Amino acid sequence: MFVWVLSSVYIGLSEAFGLDKFVEEDMRAIVAVPGKENSIQIKEMDIPKISETEALVKVKLVGLDRTDREIIKGLHGESSEGKKELILGHESLGRVVRVGNQVKSFKPGNLVVATVRRPDDCINCRVEEYDMCLKGNYTERGIKGMDGFLSDYYAEDERFLVRVPDELGKLAVMLEPTSVAEKAVRTAFEAQRRMKWRPETAMITGTGTLGLITAVLVKLKGLDVVCVDRSNGEYKEKIFSELGVRHFNDQKINLHDIPKKIGKRMDIVFEMTGSSSIALHVIMIAGTNAAVVLSSITGGDKHIVICSDCFNQGMVLGNKTVVGTVSSNKRDFQQGIVDLLAAEKRWPGLLAKFITGRYSPERISEAISSMGENIKTVIEFDTSDLGNINPESSEETSKESAQGR
Ligand SMILES: [Zn+2]
């Protein structure tokens, strides 16, 4: 009887986690040829073999972002050595189904998110600060020289996996962008150790997923937050109002007028629009002793004319600091978990509203083309063992609900 009960529990658990399903199957993988436009396709592939220090992870959800879209357009990306195609996707959430003999910190059933960057041998990478890589010979899963996570399974060394509490559930698909926001916030606060600093107001330009998550993080720090973007829709207005942030549309107000309009000095500015000209303007808008954090990747060759004397004088007399930030490291993922849990507690249900587009792997092209209308678009592989994500968002209604982003 006792044995029967135990084996029933095991079967129940393994069914719930899909642990028994991976043995003989091939897997689906979404691939593209870097440098070649519209080469995206779904392929059948072998499930990866794991080494002694790796875990095999069954993919639950993968988020898409601008980098994925650029790879698909042929503007970005690099496949791994000897391969033509790259498995896309770097924002993952999955569950461990099998571990190598030497894996110490994970076991089947654990919910995990993988970090993205893999180190080279530079001084920063050697101390696990691979987001600050000096030589640039790093690789990135789904982006640069390594396959990503848009497949039914992936293998990963346990050093690059982050354990996610089950209570975070589907929201953990936003942990990777959250880690990037965490690094931006951490960078601002570390840079400002140069003085006694009590920031009151933060301005965030651009309210895609990264901007919204950054707004959440700085609200959690108790700051007054001003979001600037081009959205007109009611959907985002509700998010701003629930979060308690002020919102301006930069097509209706001159950016430079915002501090005066609200009577506040901008102590931190996070520039997240993807526009280099806005990046230069926000440096001028930032207040005395401010930190300006730039995070937009702008691959074009845009030129603008600015008053260089004004720009320089503002920087010097204002004691301003401007820092660039990209990617994140494992401690940013760990801090991200703490803050996502805190945010869910403070604003229940709000984070789920950021996920407005949900698509099956087979509908990847549709998912990509809908990204401009969505806040966060995710590909759902297998979410049967995770709770409901966003009752207001279904595949059918997602496009309408997020209009006006
Ligand atoms: Zn390095």
Image (cartoon, rainbow, N blue to C red):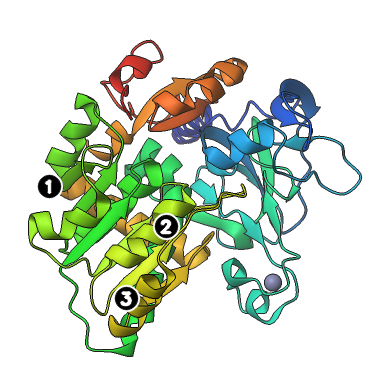
Is residue 10 found left or right of 90 in the rendered image?
A: left
Count of marks, rendered view: 3
- Residue 4 image offset from top left, x and y in percent: 49, 29
| Residue at 16% over, 63% down | 223
Residue 244 numbered tag: 1
Residue 169 numbered tag: none
Is residue 27 found left or right of 361 in the rendered image?
A: right
Label 2 amino acid? Ala
Q: Quadrant of residue 225?
A: bottom left
**Mark 1 Cα shell of 10 Å, populated few (<14), some (14-19), many (≥20):** some
Is residue 222 found left or right of 177 in the rendered image?
A: left
Element at label 3: helix
Label 3 amino acid? Gly
| Residue at 62% over, 50% down | 301
Residue 12 makes an appearance in the image = no
> Of discs 1 and 2, which sits in the foreground?
2
CB atoms of marks 1 and 3 within 8 Å: no
Which residue occupies the foreground of this view, 124 or 26? 124
Which quarter shows the N terminus?
top left
Label 1 amino acid? Gly
Position of 299 relative to 378 (above/below): below
Mark 2, residue position: 279
**Mark 3 Cα shell of 10 Å, populated few (<14), some (14-19), many (≥20):** some
Which residue occupies the foreground of this view, 366 or 100? 366
Residue at far top of view:
396
- Residue 266 image offset from top left, x and y in percent: 21, 66
CA gap, disc 3 and disc 2: 15 Å
Element at label 2: helix
Residue 314 numbered tag: 3
CA gap, disc 1 and disc 3: 30 Å
Q: In which quarter of the image is ligand 1?
A: bottom right
Residue at far bottom of view:
195
